[in-house]
Amino acid sequence: MSHQLQIVGAGLLGTSVGLALAGTDWQTWVADADPAAQLLAGELGAGNPGWAATDPDLVLICVPPLALSEVLAKVIGLYPNSTLSDVSSVKTYPQQEAEKLGCGERFVGGHPMAGRERSGAVAAQADLFEARPWAICAATAVDPERVALVTSLARACGADPLVVDARAHDEAVALISHLPQVAASAVAGQLADAEALALTLAGQGLRDTVRIAGSDPALWTDILTANARALAPHVSRLALDLTKVAEALQRVALDDAAPALHRDVDKSIERFLDRGRTGISQIPGKHGAPAAEYTVVPVVIPDEPGALARLFASVAKAGSSVEDIALEHSAGHPVGVIELSVRPAEAQGLVEQLHADGWSSH
């Protein structure tokens, strides 16, 4: 069955939705307040630039949270019958705004758990939503057929739809999405006045930690403030934990005793780190399965065309399934180290095959 979709907002998410639907039975239009962004999204293949002439089946609003109310007011005037949805990373606020504007019975909030630290149509990807959760938050008064329509959109984009209460959603993302953004920005902010030597020594661990700090500050200010009630307690707890670590380190710094003695007497630092290790073990594995332990196989790889293809050919010959990869470049050297995470039972066979094919692995 063919559907018509009006996308409002030609940024990363809006354009990615249009690209994901290209070649499907969804007919799309993409509108944006910036004519250049609207035209670019159309040229990239995300849909017809501009507004649909008549009510589409669904209008998907892809703007920052605090801009949603103004856009929603315009949309309900243009399309009095369409189902309305959004992609904001907060869900209570959009639902409240829809109810204030008198369109709550046809508004189905949505949030694809996907994104990048880059923004705009140029960063859009057709596979951005593949196998990612797409939260769907609808009030009880909404017609189930409208919920089903938004659910079908999520599936058409390759996502896994998950129906969830709006307030419960906001509590969850405060911890697993918004708090990490705050923490990454806090660490990255310490680099603003860093000495050149420190930055020269920076490795992959730092890059992994601060990657999302490169996100759009204006957008994230909207997101954090829109979810302030759920987020504030988490930030306070994080600040308290860091304060305790700082106090423990200060005690060590002011004492001339050997560091080993402090480790025996003051366990607060170790408890802090151990709790972090416990926390990361709670993150589910693939497809929501219980978290799994993996063996990391480091491989030295030259910085030259075709190197990755040859490496993964060796992995395929070993019959191994790579669960995750991380690549670290060696500053000033024409090689890097790629870390392949595999199941422990596959590690030895993989290492043997890599050595047989001439790879340096340890």
Image: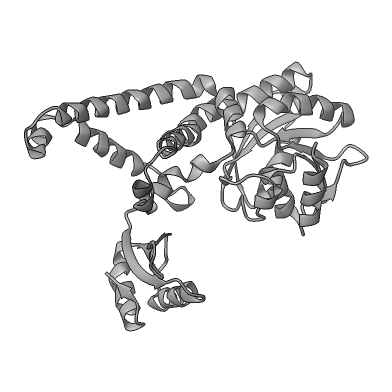
> Residue most toward the top?
100
- Please name whichever residue, 224 or 99, is drawn nearer the observer in this view of the structure: 224
- Please name whichever residue, 292 or 52, is drawn nearer the observer in this view of the structure: 52
Task: Locate residue 29 relative to residue 17 in the image: left or right.
Answer: right
Residue 318: where, in percent of width, then height?
A: 38, 76
Residue 360: where, in percent of width, then height?
A: 31, 75
Name which residue lies at 41% across and 71% down: 334
Vertical side of 232 occupied by 347: above or below? below
- Asked whether the viewer can see residue 332, the reply is yes
Task: Locate residue 156 relative to residue 347 in the image: left or right.
Answer: right
> Residue most toward the right?
53
Name which residue lies at 45% across and 73% down: 312
- Asked whether the viewer can see residue 139, the reply is no
Vertical side of 271 occupied by 210: above or below? below
Task: Locate residue 212 relative to residue 243 in the image: left or right.
Answer: right
Residue 158: where, in percent of width, then height?
A: 64, 52
Task: Locate residue 187 relative to residue 138 in the image: left or right.
Answer: left
> Residue most toward the front?
196
Numbered disc total: 0
Quadrant position of residue 276: top left
Residue 298: where, in percent of width, then height?
A: 33, 65
Quadrant position of residue 112: top right
Query: What is the quadrant of the C terminus in the image?
Result: bottom left
Image colouring: one colour
Name which residue lies at 74% across and 43% down: 10
